[in-house]
Amino acid sequence: MPIDAAKALSAAPRTDEISWTAKDVQLYHLGIGAGVPAIDPGELRYTLESRLHVLPSFATVAGAGLPGVIRALSAPGVDVDLAHVLHGGQSLVVHRTVPAQGTATATARITGVYDKGTAALLVLRTEAADADGPLWTDEARIFVRGEGGWGGDRGPSARTPGEAPTGEPDRTVERRTREDQALLYRLSGDDNPLHADPEFARAAGFDRPVLHGLCTYGMTLKAVVDTLLDGDVTRVRSYATRFAGVVYPGETLRIRMWRQGSGRVRVAVTAVERGEAPVLADTVVELS
C-alpha cells in the first residue's frame, strides 16, 4: 500500500519558518475576488496597504509554502498519485488577528490516516506561532482515491455536530467567479496542475480545470464577513467546511447564511449554473 499509516503517524513534525508581506495578503485577497468595485471602501480594506485588514483564511496560504494538500503528500509514508487526490475539508482556528506582515514558525504533522473504503483520508494539522505566541491552527482533510480498503479505522464523521440550518436563510448572496480565477489564485502558492492544466484535469476525471477548494473557502468567508460582520475580520474565531463538490471557474456561487445565536453562522454554498450543485457543506463560522 502506497500509504504506510504507521509511518505517516509516527513521523516527526515538519517545521518551517514562513514569512509574508502586505503584497502577499493583497494578492490573496485579489485571488478570492476582492477589489470589485475597485474604489468601494469595503473592498479597499482588502486591497489598499494603508488600510489593510487580513481575512483569516489567508492563513491557509501564508508564507507561500507548500499548500496543505501537497505538504501532506510529501510526508513520510505517503507515496501517491496527485491525480487521485481531492481536498475533502478544511478547518481553521484563529488564536490572534493575523498581521498584514510577519514571520512565524509553522509545524505540521499527519494526525490521522483513515480507511474510507474506496479512499484513504489523511488529516494534516499545522500550527503557526510567532514571537508573541500561537497565531492559528489549521487542519486539512485529504482524500486519496483508490487507497482505502485495508481494514483500518474509518475515523470520525466529517459532519458538523449540532442542528443543521432550517428555514429560509438570514442572508443569501451570489458571487461570480472569474474564468481566470484559478490562474490568479494559484499565484498565492498552490500550483497543483489540476487547477490550470486541462490534460491533467481530464486525467483526474474532470472536464476541465477546477477552482481550488481553498479559493471557494476564502470567497465564502469574505461574503460572511462583509454581509454579516460589517467587514470586521477580527470577529472570526474559527471556520470549518466540507468540500462537497467542485467549482469551475466562471460559475456563480450562491452563498446562504443562517445566524445561530450571536456567535455562530451556518453556511451552505452551491453552484448556480449546475442546478444548485453542492459546493461547501457542513460549514460553520464561529464568532467572538
Image (cartoon, grey):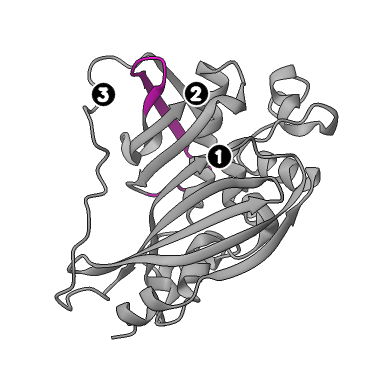
Q: Amino acid at mark 2?
A: Ser
Pick whichever of labels 1 and 3 is earlier in the sequence: 1
Which label is found at residue 165?
3
Disc 2 to disc 3, C-alpha distance:
20 Å
Res 190 visible = no
Q: Nearer the viewer, residue 75 or 254?
A: 75
| Helix, strand or loop under label 2 | loop
Q: How many marks?
A: 3
Res 142 visible = yes
Q: Which residue, as the protein is rendered here, is positioned at the far right?
A: 50
Q: Residue at x 31, y 35 (%)?
A: 275
Near mark 3 (Cα within 10 A), the count class, few <14, some 14-19 or many ≥20, is: some
Asked whether, in this view, residue 162 is left or right of residue 172, the answer is: left
Name the image quarter holding the N terminus: bottom left
The residue under label 1 is: 95
The residue under label 2 is: 288
Quadrant housing residue 65: bottom right
Comparing labels 1 and 3, the label whose residue is closer to the camera: 1
Magenta range is: 246-266
Q: Residue at x 27, y 48 (%)?
A: 158
| Helix, strand or loop under label 1 | loop
Q: Is residue 80 above or below residue 142?
A: below
Pick whichever of labels 2 and 3 is earlier in the sequence: 3
Pick whichever of labels 2 and 1 is earlier in the sequence: 1
Quadrant housing residue 11: bottom left
Disc 2 to disc 1, C-alpha distance:
11 Å
**Residue 265 part of the magenta-drawn span:** yes
Residue 269: x percent and y percent? 38, 34
